[in-house]
Image (spheres, helix red, strand yellow):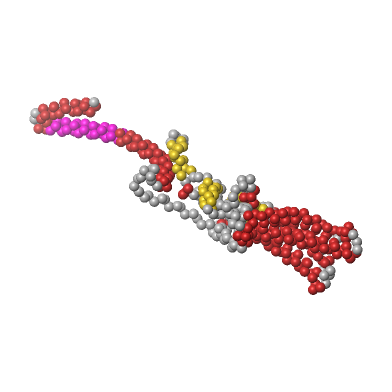
Amino acid sequence: MAKQRVYQVWKGNNKFFFGGRLIFGPDARSLLVTLLLILVPVIIFCALVARHLRHEFPAYNAGYAIIVVAIVFTIYVLVLLLITSAQDPGIIPRASHPPEEDFHYESSASVEAGGKRTPSLQFPRTKEVLVNGATVKVKYCDTCMLYRPPRCSHCSICNNCIERFDHHCPWVGQCIGLRNYRYFFLFVSSSTILCIYIFSMSALYIKILMDNDHGTVWEAMKESPASVVLMAYCFISLWFVGGLTGFHLYLIGTNQTTYENFRYRADSRHNIYNRGCFNNFFEVFCTKTKQSKNNLRAFVQEESERPPAANTQEPEVDDMSGNPRSKVEDDLEIGGDLLAISQRRNFEEADENVDLRSRGSNGKQQRDSSEAEFALGLDRQEAQYSSRGRRSGNWDIMTDTQPMDHTVPRSRNDDGQ
């Protein structure tokens, strides 16, 4: 059987392309809509507006620079979109089993079928960790079977735990997290600049038409309806991408995520991650992007069986003064084997009953066979004595056999009793 790669057995809802080199969210088709919303206006601008501006700035052929800037900046925006959508946003690998070191023994026992009482094993749903000198509670994720690090959350759309989870963006078809937040902000802010650029160049073309024909605004708009459509489109888009850019500037300056801002806004909590405006911007834009924790093209390694716990015997100590961790481990071993021990004892008792019955039947058969052999031996002795008396003609020997004849039925009667 051929070995499978990690992306082929991936348990999340992500989609992979080019052999696991690109990872997208489950709603990757929304990228097509985003691409159309960017490319169609730029194409209309270059074909119907910027083309007429080539000869309006004859010095150094500056008119051509308008088209070049629009094309280059559009390519830059598309590259940022691809980087944001096609890389690991900070997915934390799932664990193969719950964290055993965090199990604890519950004193109350649960009753199973058959009246057997077995101890129940549980582990805490939250843990406390120290972050920047403050205590933070982290929650346990049932899906990924791990305790989420601080600022981590489980995305229900991608079905993954994401480090420094910000939000799931349907326009890029991917979660926004620790590893792609920088590129997401650059994509949004660059889209804002692109909208402003197209809006400005379209308004400039309307102004040029008004100056050349000495007409009114309405006449210029009738001569270039494409410019009017582009201005309206960019104005509406600016409310979205421009507002989003301003909102994320505020989040970066205060070192918050979208998830934290919406969830903890009413709590008025002190932000323990805020390191000052300058340091917050430096952390987002000037630090090295962390390496992905998932090697999607690696071959799946067969999980080896975990070795049994070493049986180390230590002197018993009082429950109140002893090591609570060793007490928990001992209780875990006892609780896990109670059911097996009770079943083994039931089987042993059943085997002993069967052995006793078989031994009893065999003993009775042996006693019956010994009685039969004893009776047969007496008969043979009687026959021998009688034949010897006849041959010798001395019947005095028969007197020796008479008491023997009386002893035989007595012994049989004794056995019968």
Q: Position of residue 133 (x, y in %)?
A: 53, 53
Q: Residue furthest bottom?
A: 60
Q: Position of residue 291 (x, y in %)?
A: 57, 61
Which residues are drawn in magenta? 361-388
Main SS of the magenta part reads helix
Q: Is residue 235 magenta?
A: no
Q: Is residue 387 magenta?
A: yes
What residue is drawn where x is 35% and y is 35%?
Answer: 353
Q: Nearer the viewer, residue 82 or 314?
A: 314
Residue 350 lies in quadrant:
top left
Q: Position of residue 327 (x, y in %)?
A: 40, 45
* Depicted 151 relative to depicted 79: above or below: above
What residue is drawn where x is 24% and y is 27%?
Answer: 416
Q: Nearer the viewer, residue 79 or 139?
A: 139
Residue 32 lies in quadrant:
bottom right
What residue is drawn where x is 37% and y is 39%?
Answer: 345
How many numbered badges does the structure rendering display? 0
* Depicted 305 relative to depicted 412: above or below: below
Q: Nearer the viewer, residue 317 or 394?
A: 317
